[in-house]
Every structure is written in structure tokens, then in C-alpha cells.
Image (spheres, rainbow, N blue to C red):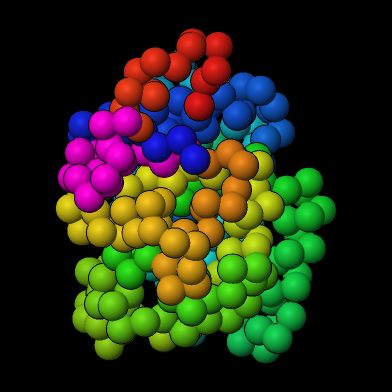
Amino acid sequence: MEIVPLGTPEEVARLAADVVEAAVRARADAVLGLATGSTPLPTYRELIRRHESGAGPSYARVRCFTLDEYVGLPPGHPESYRATIARELTDSLGIDPDHVQGPDPAPEDLPTAGSRYEEALTAAGGVDVQVLGIGSDGHLAFNEPGSSLSSLTRIKTLTEETRHDNARFFGSIDEVPRHVLTQGLGTILRARHLLLLATGAGKADALATAVEGPLTASCPASVLQLHPHVTVLADAEAAAGLARRDHYREVYDGKPGWQGL
Ligand code: PGA
């Protein structure tokens, strides 16, 4: 894993935007894996800013897959991840809505939603860069503690902690759905490059447990330790709990320019 301790969330956003843009420049029809939540929003705003200024690459042929989706919201609900990712990123980058896919939460199709999403990901050739956040309980996508480290896309039940964390997007915790469809940890591991973003003091414990603790289903994000190409971008607050923080920074500062992220 490459862990890059940075200063501010804006620094995280700039470097994360560099990684996403590099993937699209390398392949015009790149497949991007997109996370929702608060953490990636500065990165998405930076990508949009660059795109609108003419400095960014063309996204005309890019395809996108979201990590997860709530089950039980009416179609088109503003907090559905389908609507959120269009509003926060893909519409502004000019990405055709047909090029953006998420797990299908239609109630009658739930039994096959997971396998259909796996097939869609495979048919697209897999994800080139997967943007990830981390839950305060160590979840990755909506793989809550106890998730199989080789799980595939399926329905999951949110923990109280996650529903509490996400209540800010809804009127109250009672409105936060209890169930979700989420890419599994095994699904996420198939992406070619994992880009985990962590900002704020609320993520410090989860990040330290994920990258410096043991590999365990009790901290689903620890599965990152199994992947050959992981980049963790953390601001100062999120990196505060890392025992080897100074070493990670020394490694990053000493990297030859040709290596990239
Ligand atoms: P957040 O969520 O970015 O809104 O903190 C991260 C997550 O739940 O994975």
C-alpha cells in the first residue's frame, strides 16, 4: 500500500483528481469506480473545475460504476446514489447517464441484482480506478464489519453507526434506509487501482486500524492490504493515528517522478 499523509482536504482532492485524470488520459474509455459520501466531494468539485476550465480530459467515452445503492428509496430520490453521483459529478463532466451504472434496487429484481451487477462490471472489462471512502466503523462501500473478505455484490443491512453517520443526508435517522446493495470486498479487490480517500478526525481510528491493524472482517477496509495497487490519500487529521506516518511521508517525498501514484 502507498499511504500519503497530506495536510488539507484540498490537497487530498488535488492529488486524487490527478489520479483520476491520469487514468482517463491513459484510456479514453476508462472505467471509473465512484464512491458517494462527503469525502470525495472536494475531489469531484476539483475534477469539475478542471473540466470546465478546459484543463481536464474528455469524459465522453468514460464509463462509471457506483459502489452501492440504498434499497427502499423511491426511484429518483435525491439521496439515492444514482441521483447523487449524477448531481455531484457525472452530469457536470458531460458523462452520458447511460454510461453510469449502479446496483439496481428495484424491489422485484433484488434477488438477481448482485449477480447482474457483477456481470455488468465484468462485461465492461473491470474498473480501472476505484475511488473509496472509509466508514467510521471501518466499512468499505457498504461492507459492514463481519463482511466476507471475498464477498460479491449483494444486499446488506447497515449498522446503527452508519445509519447515524448518514442521517445528515436525510431528515432524521428514521428516514435512512436499513438495507443497501453494495459491491462486495471481493468485487472491489478486482479493480486495478484502489484510491482510498480519508479526511477528518472521525476517520483517524478506522484508517489506522485498516492499514496498520490485522487483516480481519471486523475491519472490512483492512482488505486493502491484499491488493497490489492501493493509494491512500489522508489529510492531517485522518492520518493522525498512523504509527508509521512519518515513514510514509518520507517514502512519498523520496519517490522518483517516473513512478507516479
Ligand atoms: P463519508 O462516508 O465520506 O460521508 O464520510 C464514507 C463511507 O461511509 O464510506
Does the segment drawn in magenta span residue 153?
no
Q: Residue at x 49, y 40 (%)?
A: 1
Image position of 46 with respect to 241: above or below: above
Q: Residue furthest top?
A: 257
Asked whether the viewer can see residue 9, the reply is no
Q: Nearer the viewer, residue 220 or 61?
A: 220
Q: Position of residue 179 (x, y in %)?
A: 47, 83
Q: Taking 225 as reference, is 169 above or below it?
A: below
Judged left or right of residue 235, residue 188 is right
Q: Quadrant of residue 138?
A: bottom left
Q: Which residue appears at 54% of the width and 36% of the height?
A: 94
Relative to 191, is 214 above or below?
below
The quadrant in which residue 187 appears is bottom right
* Magenta stretch bounds: 231-247
Nearer-the-camera pick, 22 or 214:
214
Q: Is residue 15 left or right of residue 98?
A: left
Residue at 39% in and 58% down: 213
Horizontal relation, residue 149 to residue 133: left or right: right
**Residue 238 in magenta?**
yes
Question: Which residue is nearer to you in this view: 220 or 72?
Answer: 220
Residue 150, position as x, y percentages in the image: 65, 68
Q: Is residue 256 above or below residue 30?
A: above
Query: Of all residues shown, which one is farthest toward the right?
Result: 123
Q: Percent from the top left, x then y, of residue 211?
A: 41, 51
The quadrant in which residue 206 appears is: bottom left
Viewer-nearest residue: 17 or 147? 147
In percent of width and height, residue 175 lies at: 31, 84
**Measuring 73% from the left and 56% from the top, which residue is drawn there?**
121
